[in-house]
Amino acid sequence: MPRLKGWIAAVAADPAAMLFVAAVVLFIVILVGMALAARRRRRDDHGERVGLAPEAPAQVVAIAPWVEEGRQLFSLWQERVERLGELQGRLAAMAQEIEQLKAQAGAQAGRIDELRAENLRLGQEAEAFSMERDQLRAVLARIGELVRQATEARPSVAGEATPGAGP
């Protein structure tokens, strides 16, 4: 037993030895699997040559409803699988449409931001024009007042008698 432990410790310490042991074990497993497969194949071949005994009609009648139910279930599952394929296609189309809408929404959001900036700029410009208009009105009002004063003051400056003034 101590000799086996020493051998196991030596194999465990060397990676090459561990690979060799793993390869040997794998080889043995493959051989056993091949032997079992050959045995099963021989048994199946022998069963085909001998032939199976025909089943009794009562057994066939008893199995028939199960077979029919199995066919119905299979058909139902086929329909569900087809429906699932259809739904997956629709889902993929919807996902693509959502991506397109997101892209359009992003573009529209950018356009909205541009329009807001333009609106703000135009509002400031309109406010500046409004202030300039008010200044021009004030200047025109002052000019109008000066013209009115000038036309009233002109007859007295020219030496003409003002109405209501006596000689």
Image: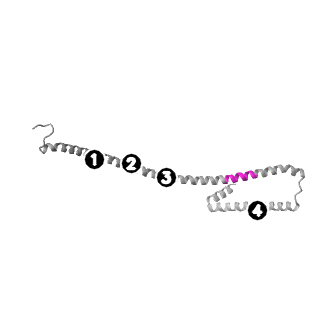
Image point 43% across, 51% down: which residue? 115
Q: Is residue 149 left or right of residue 77?
A: left
Question: Does the magenta segment cover residue 4?
Answer: no
Residue under numbered circle 3: 106
**Percent position (x, y) of residue 56?**
90, 52
Crowding at mark 3 (Cα within 10 Å: few <14, some 14-19, many 20+): few
Chain-order first, disc 1 or disc 3: 3
| Residue 136: mark in rendering | 1
Residue where numbered disc 2 is placed: 120
> Gap in Å between the C-alphas at discs 4 and 2?
84 Å
Mark closest to the chain's N terminus, 4 or 3: 4
In the picture, measured across the screen, residue 48 lies left or right of residue 151, that is right
Q: Earlier in the sequence, mark 3 or mark 2?
A: 3
Q: Which residues are magenta?
A: 74-85
Q: Residue at x 76, y 62 (%)?
A: 34
Cα separation between marks 1 and 4: 108 Å
Residue 164: quadrant of the picture: top left
